[in-house]
Amino acid sequence: MIPVCRLEDIPEGESVRLETSPPIAVFHTEDGELYAIDDTCTHQDASLSEGWLEGCLVECPLHAASFDLRTGQPTCLPARRAVRTHSVTVDDGVVHVHIAVEEGTAA
């Protein structure tokens, strides 16, 4: 379990990048949900935390591949492989990421 930041430090519609190996992006959707995925697009080496968030989808800033934050699955080309998802909890106002063990599954 990795502490990320206080919940109020991630405004709705924004994301935070964790400098883990590999990097992880934590998204706070406009609906108030929190999701965490590996931060690197599976199509090409681009940071998804710098992409555009719409609902539960994030669009890669490089070639517009889109990923579902709930499953990690790509929703359009050019990406063909999923990104790994991680579970997120909030404890006493602090956001925590629980790193997934296997690619494509949440811990």
Image: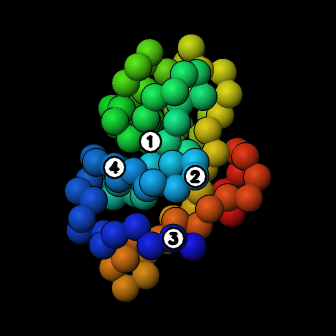
Mark nearer the N terminus (3 vs 2): 3
Mark nearer the N terminus (3 vs 4): 3
Quadrant into which the N terminus falls: bottom right
Query: Residue shown at 68%/63% (left/top)?
Result: 107
Query: Residue shown at 35%/53% (left/top)?
Result: 16
Q: Nearer the viewer, residue 49 or 89?
A: 49
> Looking at the picture, which amino acid does disc 2 mark?
Ser
Q: Residues within 10 Å of mark 1 (few under 14, many from 20)?
A: some
Q: Which mark is residue 21?
A: 2
Mark nearer the N terminus (4 vs 2): 4
Which residue does the numbered mark 1 point to in the structure image? 56
Which of the two marks, 3 or 2, is nearer to us in this view? Answer: 2
Which residue does the numbered mark 4 point to in the structure image? 15
> Looking at the picture, which amino acid does disc 4 mark?
Ser
Mark nearer the N terminus (4 vs 1): 4
Query: Could you say whether the residue bearing mark 1 is in a helix, strand or loop?
Result: loop
Residue 64: image x %, image y %?
43, 18
Q: Residues within 10 Å of mark 4 (few under 14, many from 20)?
A: many
Residue 51: image x %, image y %?
36, 32
